[in-house]
Image (cartoon, rainbow, N blue to C red):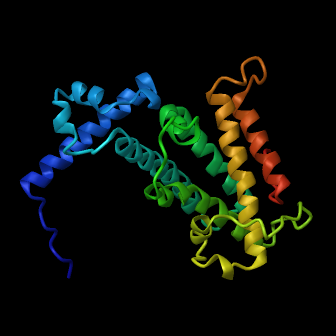
Amino acid sequence: MTEPTTPLRARDRARAEVMSELLAAARARLESEGSAALSLRAVARDLGMASSAVYRYVPSRDALLTLLIIEAYDAVGEVAEKVAADAHGADPAQTWLEVARAVRRWALDQPYSFELIYGTPVRGYRAPDDTVRSAVRLWGVIIGLLMAAARDGVLDPAGPDFDPAGRMAPEALAVAGFTDPTTVPDDVARIAIRSGTLFTSLVGAISVELFGHLHHVAGDYARFFDVTIATSAAGVGLRVSLD
């Protein structure tokens, strides 16, 4: 029998509503002025609140940035996870292409969120450990697809040999089910390192398009993106078909 859900108290509901409005106002400021110019004073003014009142909900500008960063990481992670889940059992290489395309669509639709997490770091801001769990969601999809390709025998062993000593961070390996980095088999460690190539090519391919570096260079941005993703995938042993 399902336990009845305890209704939120009026005070909790009010606080949740204010937080939702606060984050919406912060996102709007992010789009209009960029992350470096984000301030609690400006957000409070947009909401018609006193600056001192905002501090009851968010203790600092950096805490607000952290909330926005976690929100963005979770959004792109959810996009990638959904595509991978919907393609369950399909060819991992082709699934990776579809995941990459979906992340690109998200970035083009939410450019300021993409820039916040993958663009120039905000001067003076240091992301806390609170952001790590959300940040590695996309890495988890990449590692999972590479491991699936290895299990299916379609991860080309002729690809470059990655040194397993160059291990990924424990948080990234944890998404593959290894909470103790010292117990990670060499083949999985190699796969984890390969995931860095796929991640880098994905973020890089989106960045050059989003930040205007392809003007007068590529005519068909979508095709250029697909070729970039397929080329980097081939470099780690995944054969992506663009036919």
Q: Is residue 142 left or right of residue 42?
A: right
Residue 64 visible from this viewpoint: yes
Residue placed farthest to the left in the image? 10
Q: Quadrant of the C terminus?
A: top right
Residue 114 position (above or below residue 91): above
Instruction: Please state if 64 lies on the left or on the right of 84 as rendered.
Output: left
Instruction: Tell me where residue 196 appears, x and y as whole percent.
Output: 71, 55
- What is the x, y in percent for residue 121? 55, 38
Q: Looking at the image, which residue sits at the far right? A: 158
* Quadrant of res 1: bottom left
Q: Is residue 108 above or below residue 186?
A: above
Residue 189 left/right relative to 237: left
Q: Which residue is depicted at the point 51% across and 35% down?
A: 123
Along the line of sight, which residue is nearer the eye, 129 or 112?
129
In this rendering, the answer to whether 80 lies above or below 68 is below
**Residue 103 found in image quarter:** top right
Residue at image location 79% in from the left, 70% down from the top? 164
Q: How many marks?
A: 0
Residue 240 seen by the camera: no
- Whole-percent x, y for residue 180 in the image: 60, 79
In the rendered image, the residue lying farthest to the top is 216
Q: Compare residues 89 and 33 and report the one nearer the observer.
A: 33
- Can you tell which quarter of the image residue 162 is in? bottom right
Q: Residue at x 16, y 30 (%)?
A: 49
